[in-house]
Every structure is written in C-alpha cells, then in structure tokens.
Amino acid sequence: MNGWLEKAWRKGLTYRPSLDPDDLWSKALRDAPAAGEQSPRSEADCADFRLRLEILCESLVSEAALNPLGLTMAHGQLVRAIRQRLELGALWQAEPELLETPLAPPVIVVGHMRSGTTRVHRLLAADPSLSATRFCDSWQPVPRSPDTRPAWSAFTLLLARALDPWIDTIHPFGVTRADEELGWLAAALDHSAYEAQWHIPSFTAFSETRDPTPLYREFTRMLRTDANWHGNAHRPRVLKVPQFSEDLPALLGQFPGARVVRTQRCANDTAASAASLVANQMAMQSDTVDYSWIEAEVARKIALREERMDRALAAFSGPLTTVDFDALNHDWEAEVRRVYEDLSLPLTTEALQAMRGEQGRAQHSPHTAHSRQMHRFSETTA
C-alpha cells in the first residue's frame, strides 16, 4: 500500500494528502457544503476545537514520522472530524430541541484500556433496561434518514480488517454492537484516539494540561442527539471510554447523577496489553516505531490516569463500585450481581439471560487469541 501510494503521488494519479489545518478545513467544507460554518456552539468551544486541530497537525508533521499510509489515514480522519463537526452544528441549528433532550443518569465505566472495561461495558449494555451506543453511531454521530451508518461502518471495518489482520483480536468489533464512545471524543479532537496510533507527544502534553470541559460539552450534545434519534433517552446509557479516567471531573460535571463502575487489573498485565494495542496501530502508519518508547509512555499514562481517577472518585458522592479483572474472569455473574447491588439497580432474570448470551458471544470472539499472542511476543522479546 505504501509503495502504491508513493507511485500514485509521483505520477500525479492522485494528490499527496495535506495536514495543513486550512487545507483540511476547506476539504471538509467541500465534502459537506450544506453544513456551512454556522453552529449554535459557543465561540469558546469552536476556538478550542480549532486550536486542538492546529496543535495536532503541527505535532503530526514534526513528530509522527508518518509513512504514506499513515499520512493518508491521518488526513482522512481529520477531514472526517471537521466534517462531522460542521454537519452536527448545522443539524443542531436546524433542530435545537435535540440539545434539550432529557437524559436518564448514565452508568459510567471507567478504567485503563485493557483492564476489562469493554467486557463490563458489554455485559451491562446487554441489560434491556439500559442503553448503549452502537459502534456505527460512535464513529458516525450525524444521524441519517434512511440510516446508512451501519452499511458505511461495515465497509470501514472490512477495509480495517484487510489492512490489520489482528484488529479483532485486540478489540472485538460489530457494526451495530454496543461499543465505546471513542468516536465522539475523536470527533471533538480529544487526544485519546490519536495518541493510540501516532507518535504525537506534543499534542498529548498540550491536551493533558488543557481543560477538557469543551470536549465533554460536545460529547453530551452528541449523546442527547443519539438518544433522541433512537428514542432511548429514558434508559440510562452505559458509557465507556478509557479516556474518561483522565477527565472524570469534566465528565461528571455533565452528568452529576451518574453511577460509576471502576475496573481494576494487575498494572503489569494492563501495561503489556495496552502497549501491544498501541504498537499494532502505530506500526501500520509509521516505519520508525520505538517499542521501548511505547512501553514507557503507556506506563506514564497509566500512572497519570490512576492518580486522576483516585482524586476524582475521592470527591464523588454518588453510587460507585469496583470490578476486579480476575474476579470477573472467575465468576462474572457474582461480580455483576454485586455491581447491581452496589449501584442500587434492579437485576432482572431477563437481564441475566441477555448477559449470558453476551458472555457466550465473547467466549467465541477472536479477542480470546490476544493473550496467546501476548505470551508468544513476550517470549520473543525476552
């Protein structure tokens, strides 16, 4: 793919993608001309988005060492984020009542990536009294009628699996399956989706010290829109993105009545698994990936998020419970029963049956191969 792209650029068959913020913005406007520039968001939120875009582009150009495929993917992702933001702004201006959609207090799953957050999230999301975000809606937050998002997401996953044969062992995907809201944060230009695939330490450092409140205002607007579209705003949404652990005060500020589930796992196992995920993403898009840097950065990130979670939850007075990774593996039903009791949620027979179905599905997922791959990798690099 890299060779084909270089050849196509050299022969003028297609253009080399730009990472200039103005070029990206112009391309997004050409892709979605009906969206225009108008939006009901505050000027401060718009300025925050634009600043994030500029810092991210600068970091990509000066630090990421992208190969042709990486450059193409970065260009495409940023154009998509800008286009989605413009389209959402146009939608909210045309239908401002979407932003007033009343929401049931959500259930928020927080914890480091690779600490069991996905498993807990999908078990809870199986409960028909709760709701969850579909994968296709996370990465395509602009509602469509007719709803073509599942079809487009199926095509995207087909392409992703062709480029990365290991992707489903790292995280099991399904077009309409319950999934994390990482796509919504990416659409707001949060750093979490981008630092997991590109070497962009300057943008990460900038983001870690910046107030994330504008991001979570945007996140809440997307949640209200999605809940209104699906007609499930009355059911608590089970929310999960590992980035939440870094930004809990801003998130809880949007949802003061939330219930919180925190996951825990052995720090060494968490770090090893997280490093493998980041390496998998970076190795496709850069030819100069430093695995030792990834390991050190993952360890730093875990320490930062652990400290921020501890501080935020110490000040949290709402319903809170903790799920241990090993205990979940040992007896997931007992852990789920305890979680529901701690959160004062009713656990019905119907919910348990649905969770058993989800558990059976997970046991046959390609994701189960990841631990074996990690074991082989550790033997190779020892």
Image: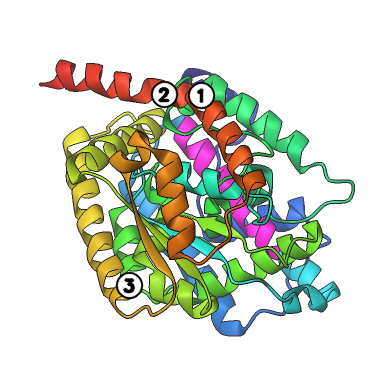
Question: Neighbour class for label 1 at 10 Å: few (<14), some, many (≥20)?
Answer: some
Determine the main secondary structure of the stretch shown in magenta.
helix
Q: Is residue 183 above or below residue 114?
A: below
Question: Which residue, given by chain and number where applicable, does mark 2 sit on?
Answer: 368
**Type of amino acid at the residue the image marks with label 2:** Thr
Residue 70 lies in the magenta-colored region = yes
Q: Give the residue at mark 3.
A: 313
Decide: marks 2, 1 in contact (CB < 8 A)? yes
Q: CA–CA distance between discs 1 and 3?
A: 33 Å
**118 relative to 279 in the view: left or right:** right
Residue drawn 39% across the image and 20% down it: 369
Q: Is residue 15 visible?
A: yes
Task: Say what secondary structure mark 3 lies in.
Answer: helix
Image height of 300 relative to 35, above or below: above
* The quadrant where residue 210 appears: bottom left
Q: In x, y percent, where is residue 49?
A: 53, 69
Direction front: furthest residue: 349
Describe residue 56's horizontal placement relative to residue 137 as left or right: left
- Dot 2 alpha-carbon crowd within 10 angstroms: few under 14, some 14 to 19, many 20 or more: some
Residue 380: give x, y in percent of width and height: 17, 16
Confirm whether residue 26 shows in the render: no
Q: How many marks?
A: 3
* Label number found at residue 365: 1
Residue 371 is left or right of residue 185, and the answer is left
Query: In the displayed structure, would residue 52 be above or below residue 350?
Result: below
Element type at mark 2: helix
Q: Earlier in the sequence, mark 1 or mark 3?
A: 3
State the extent of the magenta-drawn residues as a range: 69-86
174 or 350: which is nearer to us? 350
